Amino acid sequence: MRNTILVMVGLVAIVSALSAQSTPQHPLPPPPPENVTSSAILVSDKEPGKRLIVEGRVFAPDGKTSVAGIYIYAYNTDAEGYYSATKTFYPPRITGYVKTDKDGRFQIRTIMPGRYPEMHVPAHIHFNIWGAGYPFQYAEEMRFEGDSYLTPEMIENDKKAGEFALIRPVTSGSDGALHCNVNLKLITRTNFPGELPDYLK
């Protein structure tokens, strides 16, 4: 009986460990570094691609109250549409952390992501968000107006989100970079399908 219990405990531990693993389908960010600020540069000057500056703000589920102290882990593909340095889907190479300021604002400097090769998926940026009492959650991908891979259905559905729409207009700045802004709205329950590691709780 004792051996059976030990085996069952061991299996539970294995399953829990596996459920907390990061996968291409449900990726988890690495632990945040110390002293995360509200702005981050995700790429070096040598990174190919058009520079993109994303200004954002995070709101509570009521859609009105901005939230300070939210961790945001952002990542996107390179200019050719690949995540990793070996031109594979996973793990991502262009990544970075920010933490919202007292007004819930953040800024990310990256490049305009490329679209996945041989796939009709619009270019996008991923956001993983949590903190300030809110659980880890995947925000919907931020996409860009004018992308020919956006379908009429995608566009119409996005319009329903109003100021939280995630298909964003892009403008060219006098600094030579592209600019866009985005509002993110928190949810009260995690949408990760498994046990989260301690640093994300």
Image: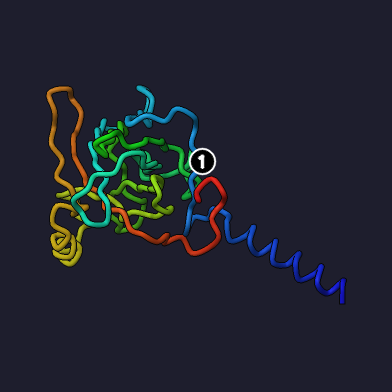
- Circle 1 is placed at which residue position? 86
- Residue 199 position (above or below residue 49): below
Residue 92 placement (x, y as % from top left): 46, 43
Towards the viewer: 2 or 172: 2
Rendered-image quadrant of the N terminus? bottom right
Towards the viewer: 141 or 99: 99
Quadrant of residue 112 in the image? top left
- Residue 185 as seen in the image, left or right of residue 18: left
- Residue 5 position (above or below residue 179): below
- Residue 93 position (above or below residue 149): above
- Residue 19 position (above or below residue 2): above
**Chosen colour scheme:** rainbow
Quadrant of residue 109 in the image? top left
Towards the viewer: 46 or 61: 61
Residue 107 placement (x, y as % from top left): 28, 33
Q: Residue furthest bottom?
A: 1
**Image point (38%, 25%), residue name:** 44
Residue 58 placement (x, y as % from top left): 27, 45
Q: Amino acid at mark 1?
A: Thr
Tag 1 secondary structure: loop
Q: Residues within 10 Å of mark 1 (few under 14, many from 20)?
A: few
- Residue 145 as seen in the image, left or right of residue 29: left
**Image point (32%, 46%), residue name:** 125
- Residue 13 as seen in the image, left or right of residue 76: right
**Image point (24%, 50%), residue name:** 143
Quadrant of residue 158 in the image? bottom left
The tally of labels here is 1
Residue 165 placement (x, y as % from top left): 18, 54
